[in-house]
Amino acid sequence: MTADQITYLVFFIVVSIALVFDLGFLSKKNKTISTQTALKQTIFWVILAFAFFIFVWYEEGKIIAIEYISAYLMEWSLSIDNIFVFIIIFSAFKVDPKYYGRVLLIGILMAIVFRIIFITIGIALVQQAQWTLYIFGVFLIYTGYKMFASTQESEFNPQQSKVYKWMLKYLPITLEDGGGKFLIRNNGKPLYTSLFVVVVMLAITDLVFALDSIPAVMGISRNNLVIYTSNIFAVLGLRSLFFLLRGAVAKFEFLQQGIAIILVFIGLKMLLEHYLEQWITKNQLIVVSLLMIVVCIIGSILYSIQNTKKKESRNKTV
């Protein structure tokens, strides 16, 4: 077996076992997950992702390992942005908190399938036409600029989205949760419940976010192993991260700006990579990308926390 085949095999085995452990043994049906449990599960997924980083370093070498951890950290930061939209979706359809875990589980598993398909298409496009990377670069710069300057996510209304309107038009929908079921029958007529709607909305929302994140990860690495594994690890940690941050995500008000800077940086890197490599080596550029991602994530979170404390302090004095 080649090094890549061994790494893929280990990744598949580790993720399968982790899913059984985390989503099976640690998660009981229709039970609200506490912040303490969510913290343990989040730590579990992060440690697993970093343990895989060590394995990749050993099996694939330092450069691939650094590309992987850079891509994972970027995807992880983008997933925090996803959570804000997830919270809005749950609130809009008035989902009972005891169903959050089950709905998130199915939505995230669907998102993984969609991402694998989307990544495969993206890789095929780049392999067939390298110039598409320049389109991705311009797209990331534009997206980063719009994200930095706007607060459009706070205005997102799931019930006005095209996906929801399409489901209302073509599917028999009821706004009831069906006691935790996705499909119920009323006088023999099948009806899709609000939980089914939310699952579809979560999966589609993640796919929309993938329009940014997948080109961005391609800006960090062209290695298929890095692209697939970093994305899947980040998505698998979404559920526990949701329960950990759902009460505090609003405090990270400047995280969006930090992510925006990362997207602009990666977009510029994709456009100027040929010229940059005349000044610094490709390996050095990879390390610079990692440092940039870490600084932007930590810096925006710390600045958000500091700004929140200042606001609370001013409110107390008023």
Image (tube, rainbow, N blue to C red):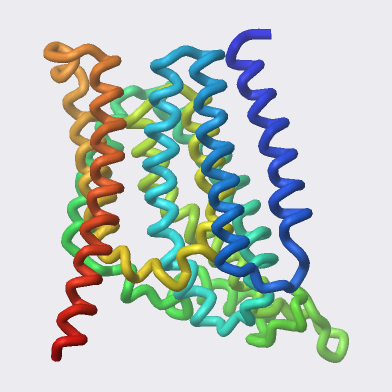
Position of the C terminus by quadrant:
bottom left
Res 192 → quadrant: bottom right
Does the rendering let one see residue 240? yes
In the picture as drawn, the residue positioned furthest to the right comes out as 188
Residue 120 seen: no
Which residue is at a point 48% across and 61% down the rendered structure image? Answer: 205
| Count of picture labels | 0
Q: Answer above or below: position of 150 versus 59.
A: below
Give the image quarter of residue 149.
bottom left
Q: Residue furthest top?
A: 1
Res. 222 image quadrant: top left
In screen coordinates, is 54 left or right of 180? left
Q: Residue at x 66, y 59 (%)?
A: 105
Q: Is 308 situated left or right of 224 in this image?
A: left
From the viewer's perspective, is 138 left or right of 65? Answer: left
Q: Position of residue 221 (x, y in %)?
A: 38, 26
For the N terminus, the quadrant is top right
153 versus 50 height, above or below: below
Q: Is residue 200 above or below residue 59?
A: below
Q: Provide residue 225's location: percent of width, then percent of height.
A: 52, 25
Residue 103 is situated, as x and y percent measured from the top left of the image, at 65, 67
Name the residue at 82% across, 89% down.
186
Say which residue appears at 68% left-offset and 33% top-offset.
14
- Image coordinates of residue 69 in percent, x first then y, are 43, 31
